[in-house]
Image (spheres, rainbow, N blue to C red):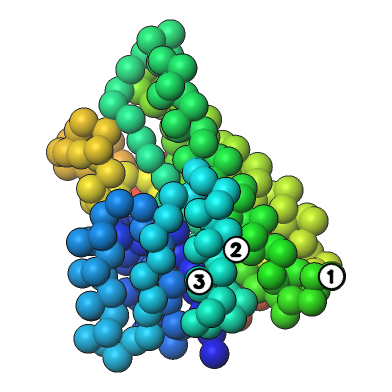
Amino acid sequence: MKSILITGASSGIGAAIARLAVRDDYAVGLCYRSNRRGAEEVAEAIRDDNGDVVMLQGDVASKSDVTKIFREFETFYGNPTVVVNNAGIVAPKVRFEDMEEMRLRKMFYTNVIGPFMVAQEAVRRMAKRNGGNGGVIVNVSSVAARLGSGGQYVDYASSKGAMDTLTIGLAQEMADQGVRVVGVRPGIIQTPIHGKGGEPDRADQMAGHIPLQRAGTAMEVAESVLWLASDAASYVTGSILDVAGGR
């Protein structure tokens, strides 16, 4: 049985990945931190599609929660075939010199340390040297990693730059262990994250600055993630795919 564990899956890109994965015959581990209602709605949609899903509550910024998530997943589906490192946060626009310490700590604990711990738990179960059968880790980054987001979210962009480095470095370590590590860099996507950053209309406002002249959809990112996770991408590792409309 193929199985996929997705962090940050109660809305946006994570939810789209979960809904699409069931159509590729994955059993789904749907991880969420606090949006239980959103997670329940995604789980219900998966069950309506005759899919197999389990909801897993926890904060990726907590090591004990990450361990708990994986152990609970194992009781249902064994070791995951695919792990999608999607959970992340953004904060309101602010100039670099005005970023407070607590904002920076929260950003990097959630967007960097959390995904590192998720990837560690995945490797402990997937790597051949640990008795695993291999697998795929997909890291969800952002084009902000290469654009910098000056005057807006330099902290967020920097955290996603760390995700890109994780993808490349871990792919090198895991190449002989049966584990592929890949990434996607979404651009401006129509998801609730813009509202969390204080700009709910940002996707529409930015459309004219995108070469394709529109924002992307969460499902378009999900399609890319599921392709990277599939056997069709079996010779792809250490690569990061931009899903950004040319931006």
Q: Position of residue 70 (x, y in %)?
A: 55, 66
- The residue indicated by pointer 3 is 72
* Residue at 49% from the left image edge and 27% from the top image edge: 105
Query: Residue 129 — which label?
Result: 1
Tell me the kind of residue under disc 2.
Ile
Q: Nearer the viewer, residue 32 or 220?
A: 32
- The residue indicated by pointer 2 is 137
Under circle 1, the secondary element is: helix
Tell me the kind of residue under disc 3.
Glu
Which marked residue is nearer to the observer: mark 1 or mark 3?
3
Q: Position of residue 12 (x, y in %)?
A: 29, 56
Query: Mark 1 or 3 closer to N-term?
Result: 3
Quarter holding the N terminus is bottom right
Contact between marks 3 and 2 (CB within 8 A): the answer is no
Q: Which quadrant of the structure image shows residue 54?
A: bottom left
Taking 35 as reference, is 230 left or right? right
Query: Mark 3 or 2 closer to N-term?
Result: 3
The Cα–Cα distance between marks 1 and 3, rounded to whole angstroms, is 23 Å
Few, some or many C-alpha atoms within 10 Å of disc 2 (few <14, some 14-19, many ≥20)?
A: many
Q: Nearer the viewer, residue 236 or 155?
A: 155
Under circle 2, the secondary element is: strand
Q: Residue 46, can we see it? A: yes
